[in-house]
Amino acid sequence: MLSIPHQAPDIRGQIITPDDAGYDEARTVFYRAVDRRPAMIVRAADASDVARAIARARETGTELAVRSGGHSPAGHGVSDGGIVLDLSALRALDIDVAGRAAWVQTGLTAGEYTAAAGEHGLATGFGDTGSVGIGGITLAGGIGFLVRKHGMTIDDVLAAEVATADGSLLRVDAAHHPDLFWALRGGGGNFGVVTRLKLRLHEVGEVLGGMLFLPATPEVVAGFIEAAEAAPDELSTIANVMPAPPLPFVPPALHGRLVVMAMMVYAGDVEAGERAVAPFRALAEPLADMLRPMRYPEMFPAGEGGPPFTAFGRTGFADGVSVAAAARILERLEASTAPMRAAQLRVLGGAMARVPRDATAFAHRDRRIMLNVAAMYADAQQRAEHEVWVTGLLGELTGGDPAAYAGFLADEGEERVRAAYPGGTYERLAAVKAEYDPENVFRLNQNVSPYA
């Protein structure tokens, strides 16, 4: 068992061990099925604490988990028997309104950042969940409500401060360590611990946003995708085909029936937004229409908790959803025995697709639709059944294409990691890894092995 003094003199932050009353809460991550017991949790107070924790892990050969918000589908934010470097106390945010940029520490959440920037009518695009940590979602890529209008989160990264495996604290940008700057934008936590990010801010004031519930028929599902691809770049959509949840605004008669629950944001003139969403409303009589003018931060409500069930999910890409494919989605959803299941369809394109493919480590700029298929269940003995269901449906929709988005990968092995970085991207990342982390200290992630 790793032994570090409970009050290590060189650590300014908090050290939490299995004997502490708050240990179980501190080791818990978003996906409740991940139940790992680290030897200790270092809640860093500053970048120097981060460097010292890395040094201890390296000196002892102990596995190091780095946690920003703890939303990793693979549970990479916690180690069994190792050190957890918890960044949640690193929360400083400095907004330069005139310069349209912000320096932010990576323990802040996307929702907190968005709320603070929103006070100035500004925003950086992240994902669709406010409780994710800034660090994790940014390094993976960041695909959310502004992806078609302003691109991915990595497209707005201007600079980073990074603690590397050898103890260095680096300022990284296009002019300083440009190879590392390229790798950080999409390559995940393979290369160091990012303690601060400089992010571009966009003017995003009032938007037309919210949720639109439509009946799930093959024609509606396929028509939704067609309308989303034809929409102006200002409109980004996330369509969840799933049983209607028992929410207060959903009529009880619809609970459990398949619906299209779409989250939508038109980041532009509200009147133009009304015209842009009209084709979606025309697909069928909405079951619930909650699209309205709002401040952008309202898309990130507070109080999001962890999933109530154990979840098994897989991610991929497709280049279209035909009526026949939509019918298959509905058939598969009806046949599943999981208490909750969903097929999520995110239409991409727009600003995201206009960034050159090799500009960042995200190599799927030309893909049209991102897919996520998930089954949530309570009985762990049913995992095999739900795994077959998830992988079967995803395989049908992707045609067997292994391509993946690293930010949504679970613990799926090296082949899937390579599929997240095609076309020479993996090899280029491995070369950067060999320069900055040749001993693979940062290995609890979607790991890119350094060249020998």
Image (cartoon, grey):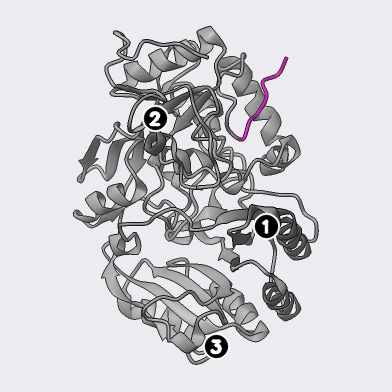
Residue 317: mark in rendering: 1
| Crowd class of label 2 (few under 14; some 14 to 19; many from 20; radius 10 Å) | many
What amino acid type should be assigned to the residue bearing mark 2? Asp
What amino acid type should be assigned to the residue bearing mark 1? Phe
Q: Nearer the viewer, mark 1 or mark 2?
A: 2
Point out the tag, 3 or 1, that comes first from the N-terminus: 3
Residue 214: mark in rendering: none
Report the span colored magenta.
446-452
Which residue sits at x=52%, y=12%?
Answer: 58
| Mark 3: secondary structure | loop
Spatial CA distance of label 3 from label 1 is: 24 Å
Residue 283: mark in rendering: 3
Residues at discs 3 and 1 in contact (Cβ within 8 Å): no
Residue 22 position, x and y percent, is: 33, 33
What amino acid type should be assigned to the residue bearing mark 3? Leu
Q: Nearer the viewer, mark 3 or mark 2?
A: 2
| Crowd class of label 3 (few under 14; some 14 to 19; many from 20; radius 10 Å) | some
The vertical placement of 252 against 330, above or below, is below
| Crowd class of label 1 (few under 14; some 14 to 19; many from 20; radius 10 Å) | many
Which residue sits at x=50%, y=30%?
Answer: 37
Decide if residue 188 is in sight here.
yes
Q: Nearer the viewer, residue 120 or 286?
A: 286
Residue 294 within the segment the image draws in magenta: no
Residue at the extreme bottom of the image, as rendered: 285
Name the residue carrying label 2: 86
Residue 55 position, x and y percent, is: 46, 11
Q: In the rendered view of the protein, which quadrant contains the C terminus?
A: top right
